[in-house]
Amino acid sequence: MEIAQINVFNLNEASQLSAIRCADLSEAASVCLDNQGHVSGKEIKIEGDLEGQFKLVWKEVTDQMRRSRNDLEDAVEGGAYCLAMLVIEKLTSLKVTKQSKKRTGFDYWLGEGNENGVQGLARLEVSGILRGTRGQINQRIKEKMRQTQKSDNLKIPAYIVIVEFSQPIIKIKKR
């Protein structure tokens, strides 16, 4: 059975964010994967409440891209957003409709793609780890589960997605 492919630079098809924002996040994901020694075509495992396996493909990372992403902590955040959005869209058909405001307890609104910027059907909270252990991934899940409680009054599901780049692995919990 052939593994489905995800093109890191097709984020604009999996969200309602601007093309420039999508390109920025896609570049960050590519730099993080490259930094960990991965080459385009790398398989990534999805585990947790949603499961799957995909083959990630991306454009060749240039020195200019690396210089632009010299702050790897910043790149990990953007890269994690990119991969989380792509995987959530593949596994649920939900797309990012807009960014959430600070202090809401989550990063993005998810919807079916026809909400035109209104509040969505679910919440997305993302965290990235450049190189981590299973214990660190599980600890981050717990932290993010608590964080999303701030917005439980919305009475819509929250997807917590942790992206670890060295293995690479994505862990998803739904609450």
Image (cartoon, grey):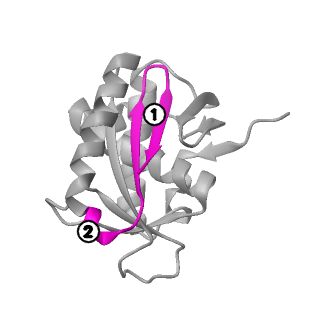
The residue depicted at 47 percent of the width and 18 percent of the height is 37
Q: Which residue is mark 1?
A: 61
Marker count (numbered) = 2
Secondary structure category for the residue under label 1: loop
Query: Is residue 51 highlighted in magenta?
Result: no
How far across and down, in percent of the image, does residue 13 sit?
56, 64
Q: Is residue 132 visible?
A: no
Q: Earlier in the sequence, mark 2 or mark 1?
A: 1
How far across and down, in percent of the image, does residue 113 sit?
52, 75
Q: Which residue is mark 2?
A: 153
Q: Could you classify mark 1 by the number of other residues whose Cα lies within 10 Å: few (under 14), some (14-19), or many (20 or more)? A: some
Kind of residue at badge 2: Asn
How far across and down, in percent of the image, does residue 135 sit?
35, 18
Query: Is residue 154 highlighted in magenta?
Result: yes
Instruction: Left or right? Give the position of 49 relative to 5.
Output: left
Residues in magenta?
A: 152-175
Secondary structure category for the residue under label 2: helix
